């Protein structure tokens, strides 16, 4: 079945945006009523548009702190293409105008979700005797909400922005990005070349391509099937890359998934949580993925919003651990180090300046590695392969005795950075609260330099005059036979910048 070809006029889009923003004038209301009165397709689109916007707003809001997600680069704060949050702690506090608009969105969402006596006249001033029609189509899956530089495959159906999708339709394109919002609250971002099909309200099939799936409460249990594996969402954000004819890669950014193999003689099942990544090959073998970057996976929006791309300095990160030891990965973030950037793949902690002066300037905009905090209990070796001459910085928790390898190979710069931890495992009677810190504040992430800094880290540096491999060691000489959350100290961070002869910024 082909998607409906109806396209709203620019004027109708503008008026519907005014409805959502709550600033529709009486004159504009009459104008919109006139546009809708004689056109059933326009009425259908208006209702779908309001429902979709409400659903997207409902899932983009952190219900506990009222934050809105950052717009994507080049997108205005008032854009009606509102995206799902990729990281609930990545946004700054919204201005008052956004908060007022937020409550209007919530009111609209409540009216639509409850569905009792709601009519378009609530917003358009239609006569009460002529309620807006509400359309039900069990074959409608959702809508295309964004397209970027899409090159459709030969003979493939070409979808347009805001076109509706039906179950059974294929989405095939050779390049670009397609973003979908499903009626069940799942958001899917596809990066080409891709071959993707929506099978049912709770299942899709990916034959090739990179995709990210983020599921709201109603979409928990959503399944993505590839030629090699099935991935079932358990309330999360996860990435899947299907390399046609070779393997399927799975990475969990938040929450958890269940992974099961579809190839091989002995089916395998694995449960993955945030910070873990595995691939399944043609023969059903399951192996750990050590490092995750833009070449291999579509990145979540919190990293894309930082204008991060492929690291120009770091080729790869690896360690001496086996799949039997861990399934955690290292995430490589190009040009992404800055205030409130996420520190670890398996924690929501964030790097911050220790005071209002912010992070040391020589670290800002550096390529960095999100390590995994579970590594703090292991003895290990980490290799950071450098593409060209660079300065490598290690951020070490000040509660840790400085390791011999760090004192031998690196120099203490004398500078500090802070970590905002938001520890969900902290007990109310914990003796580890800082002076003046309350239990409630220790559970939250704050925004900005010097805000909610729970621990401090010393900054160590080593310069590499040519492309090389930086070899890093453990934070302690012996492994600990305890669960990682029982250890107060954190794993170190890694930042790589262009090689400089001083902190003033001149580059060799």
Image (cartoon, rainbow, N blue to C red):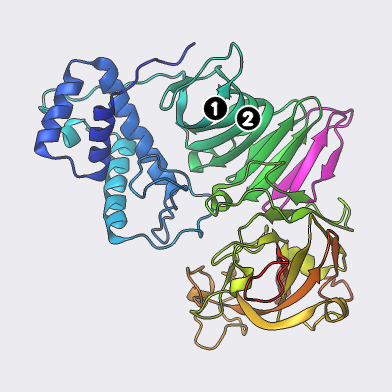
Asked if the residues shown at circle 2 and circle 1 are in contact, with their CB atoms under 8 angstroms apart, the answer is yes
Label 1 CA crowd tier, 10 Å (few <14, some 14–19, many 20+): some
Q: Is residue 388 above or below residue 286?
A: below
User: Mark 1 or mark 2, which is nearer the start of the sequence?
Assistant: 1
> x%, y% of residue 183?
45, 31
> x%, y% of residue 104?
26, 48
Quarter of the image that includes the C terminus: bottom right
> x%, y% of residue 124?
17, 33
Query: Residue 422's image quarter?
Result: bottom right
13 and 73: which is toward the camera: 73
State how far apart marks 2 and 1 are (Cα). 8 Å
Query: Residue 470's image quarter?
Result: bottom right
Q: Is residue 114 left or right of residue 299?
A: left
Q: Is residue 280 left or right of residue 8?
A: right
* Residue 265 in magenta stretch: yes
Q: Is residue 152 visible?
A: yes
Q: Secondary structure at mark 2?
A: strand
Q: Is residue 204 left or right of residue 6?
A: right
489 and 383: which is toward the camera: 383
Q: Residue at x 37, y 47 (%)?
A: 76
* Residue 156 in magenta stretch: no
Q: Secondary structure at mark 1?
A: strand
> x%, y% of residue 507?
69, 67
Q: Is residue 86 above or below residue 13?
A: below
Tell me the magenta residue range. Answer: 262-290
Residue 162's disc is: none
Label 2 CA crowd tier, 10 Å (few <14, some 14–19, many 20+): many
The residue indicated by pointer 2 is 192
Q: Residue at x 63, y 48 (%)?
A: 309
123 and 72: which is toward the camera: 72
180 and 234: which is toward the camera: 180
The residue indicated by pointer 1 is 150
């Amino acid at each position: 079945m082909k998607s409906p070809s109806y396209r709203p006029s620019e004027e109708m889009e503008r008026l519907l945006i005014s409805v959502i923003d709550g600033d529709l004038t009486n004159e504009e209301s009459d104008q919109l009523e006139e546009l809708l009165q004689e056109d059933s397709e326009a009425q259908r689109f208006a209702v779908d548009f309001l429902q979709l916007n409400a659903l997207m707003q409902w899932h983009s809001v952190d219900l506990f702190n009222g934050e809105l997600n950052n717009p994507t680069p080049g997108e205005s704060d008032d854009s009606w293409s509102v995206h799902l949050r990729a990281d609930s702690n990545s946004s700054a506090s919204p201005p008052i105008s956004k908060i007022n608009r937020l409550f209007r969105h919530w009111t609209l969402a409540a009216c639509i979700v409850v569905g009792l006596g709601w009519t378009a006249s609530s917003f358009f001033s239609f006569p009460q005797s002529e309620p807006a029609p509400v359309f039900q189509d069990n074959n409608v899956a959702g809508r295309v909400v964004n397209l970027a530089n899409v090159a459709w495959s030969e003979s493939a159906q070409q979808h347009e922005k805001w076109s509706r999708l039906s179950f059974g339709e294929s989405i095939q394109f050779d390049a670009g990005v397609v973003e979908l919002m499903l009626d069940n609250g799942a958001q899917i971002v596809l990066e080409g070349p891709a071959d993707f099909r929506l099978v049912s309200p709770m299942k899709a099939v990916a034959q090739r391509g990179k995709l990210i799936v983020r599921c709201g409460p109603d979409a928990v249990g959503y399944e993505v099937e590839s030629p090699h594996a099935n991935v079932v969402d358990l309330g999360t954000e996860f990435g899947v890359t299907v390399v046609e004819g070779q393997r399927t890669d799975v990475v969990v950014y938040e929450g958890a998934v269940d992974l099961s193999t579809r190839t091989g003689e002995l089916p395998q099942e694995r449960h993955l949580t945030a910070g873990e990544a595995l691939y399944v090959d043609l023969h059903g073998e399951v192996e750990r993925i050590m490092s995750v970057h833009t070449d291999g996976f579509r990145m979540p929006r919190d990293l894309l919003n930082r204008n991060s791309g492929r690291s120009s300095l770091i080729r790869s990160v690896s360690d001496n651990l086996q799949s039997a030891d861990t399934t955690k990965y290292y995430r490589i973030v190009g040009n992404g180090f800055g205030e409130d950037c996420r520190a670890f793949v398996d924690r929501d902690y964030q790097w911050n300046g220790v005071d209002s002066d912010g992070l040391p300037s020589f670290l800002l905009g550096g390529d960095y590695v999100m390590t995994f905090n579970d590594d703090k209990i292991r003895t290990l070796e980490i290799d950071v392969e450098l593409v060209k001459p660079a300065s490598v910085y290690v951020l070490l928790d000040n509660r840790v005795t400085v390791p011999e390898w760090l004192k031998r190979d690196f120099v203490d710069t004398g500078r500090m950075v802070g970590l905002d931890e938001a520890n969900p495992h902290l007990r109310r009677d914990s003796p580890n609260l800082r002076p003046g810190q309350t239990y409630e504040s220790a559970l939250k992430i704050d925004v900005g330099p010097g805000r909610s800094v729970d621990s401090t880290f010393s900054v160590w540096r080593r310069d590499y005059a040519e492309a090389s491999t930086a070899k890093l060691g453990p934070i302690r000489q012996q492994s600990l036979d305890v669960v990682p959350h029982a250890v107060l100290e954190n794993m170190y961070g890694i930042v790589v910048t262009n090689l400089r002869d001083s902190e003033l910024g001149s580059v060799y």
